[in-house]
Image (cartoon, rainbow, N blue to C red):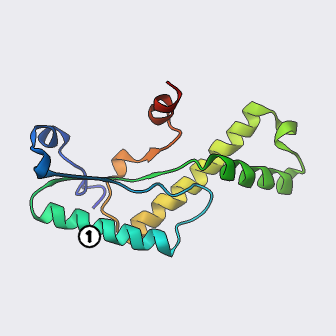
């Protein structure tokens, strides 16, 4: 279903459509500090039902997946991981190396969360996956 683009939206068609011909929803982004839990699965099931129903009635549907950076929580988890694995602190590593570790953590955990969404069968548009600290979204915050 993903390779065939079944859950992708015709953006050009949607841009020309009236507001009542569209349904857009963003997954409340789960934190990259862990895995999805039963609450995420329940919310995902409800959102998936709404998206599938709106597709069945002929609307342009865009359901965006993504993950949240969970800044302080992620920092704490990565700091503990570094201490456990190497006995070093974030200060020992330095800013750039620590940020590299955080991004590695995000890539590992974020990918796991997206795999869980796929296993749930969520009809999200994976081609539009976002992260709250990617270039486009972080630029909006820092401007």
Q: Position of residue 60 (x, y in %)?
A: 16, 51
Image point (46%, 30%), residue name: 140
* Residue 85 in the figure: left or right of residue 7: right
Q: Which residue is mark 1?
A: 49
Can you say whether 107 is above or below 42 in the image? above
Image point (11%, 51%), residue name: 21
Quadrant containing the N terminus is bottom left
Count of numbered badges drawn on the protein: 1
Image point (21%, 48%), residue name: 9
Q: Position of residue 124 (x, y in %)?
A: 32, 57
Is residue 136 or residue 2 the one in the foreground?
Answer: 136
Mark 1, secondary structure of its residue: helix
Q: Position of residue 128 (x, y in %)?
A: 35, 45
Q: Residue furthest right?
A: 87
Q: Residues within 10 Å of mark 1 (few under 14, many from 20)?
A: some
Q: Quadrant of residue 11?
A: top left
* Residue 15 in the figure: left or right of residue 138: left
Is residue 9 or residue 141 the one in the foreground?
Answer: 141
Image point (75%, 39%), residue name: 98
* Residue 26 in the figure: left or right of residue 76: left
């Amino acid at each position: 279903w993903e390779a065939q683009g079944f859950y992708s939206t015709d953006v050009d068609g949607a841009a020309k459509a009236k507001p009542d011909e569209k349904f857009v929803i963003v997954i409340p982004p789960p934190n990259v500090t862990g895995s999805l839990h039963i609450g995420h699965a329940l919310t995902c099931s409800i959102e998936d039902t709404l998206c599938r129903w709106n597709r069945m009635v002929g609307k342009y549907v865009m359901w965006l997946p993504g993950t949240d950076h969970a800044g302080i929580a992620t920092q704490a988890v990565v700091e503990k991981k570094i201490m456990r694995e190497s006995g070093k602190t974030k200060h020992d590593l330095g800013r750039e190396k620590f940020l590299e570790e955080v991004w590695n953590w995000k890539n590992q955990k974020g990918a796991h969360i997206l795999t869980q969404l796929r296993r749930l069968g969520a009809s999200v548009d994976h081609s539009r996956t976002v992260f709250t600290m990617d270039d486009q979204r972080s630029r909006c915050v820092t401007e």
